[in-house]
Amino acid sequence: MKRENQRVTLTKQLLTEALLGLLQKKPIRIVSVRELCEKAGINRTTFYHHYGSQYDLLNEISQRFLDQISERLAAADPENRDSVQERVTMVLAYLRDNRELAVLLLNNNIDPTFAERIFSLPKIGDLLDAALAGCADPRRKEATVAFAIHGSFRLLQDWINQEERVGAAEQAALILSLARRVCGSADV
């Protein structure tokens, strides 16, 4: 894989910091490329050399965030079905430890697939598939997965936005308990 040169890395870092700063004050739909470039000290030509829009930059930031969670999950034993809560707790702990970025991404993300992307990370998405393996009705299976993912995402959002929140393990237990009920399986 080709490494980016330092100038490109710096440019992307400046743009990332500028976008995250702006997202603390307003939603992404109100952030203009002009404003983003001014805050980053980058001209618009340079911006457009790397991104098509502010949404592309947000998607790149989101993907890096998800990649970092995936790296943490990669350390978990893939054969250990008892580590499900441990895996979900790892995700929540990562969100807690990176709360400022997590809040911005979870609250401002306009990507309709972001919830699915979080809950489809390796070692988490497989759990839903395994829990619903016996479901013969594909329409019911798809609806159950969507309900479990989006309901869990909402619980995750509510949890990370609270100033005083329960611990990651306790929230993971709640999410898994509800997901089990939704999926009708004790294996989730």
Image (cartoon, grey):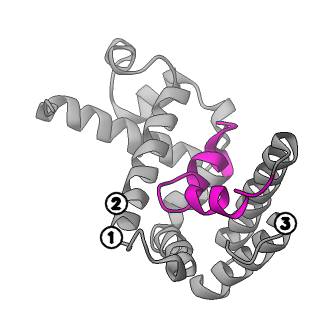
Category of crowding for the residue at label 3, using alpha-carbon neighbours closer than 10 angstroms: few (below 14), some (14–19), many (at least 20):
some
Cα–Cα gap, marks 2 and 1: 7 Å
The three-letter amino acid code for the residue at tag 1 is Ala
Q: What is the magenta range?
A: 107-135
Look at the numbered disc 2 and give the secondary structure of its residue. helix
Category of crowding for the residue at label 1, using alpha-carbon neighbours closer than 10 angstroms: few (below 14), some (14–19), many (at least 20):
few
The three-letter amino acid code for the residue at tag 3 is Val
Q: Residue tagged by mark 2?
A: 71
Query: How far across and down, in percent of the image, does residue 9 sit?
Result: 21, 36
Where 103 sits versus 36, above or below? below
Going from N to C along the chain, the mark reached first, 3 or 1, is 1
Look at the numbered disc 1 and give the secondary structure of its residue. loop
Return the residue nearer the eye: 121 or 29. 121
Q: Residue tagged by mark 3?
A: 182
Q: Is residue 167 visible?
A: no
Is residue 40 rendered magenta in the image?
no
Q: Residue tagged by mark 1?
A: 75
Going from N to C along the chain, the mark reached first, 2 or 3, is 2
Query: How far across and down, in percent of the image, does residue 7 sit?
Result: 16, 30
On the rendered image, what quadrant is the N terminus found in? top left
Q: Which residue occupies 49% across, 44% down? A: 62
Cα–Cα gap, marks 3 and 1: 28 Å
Where 44 sits versus 129, above or below? above
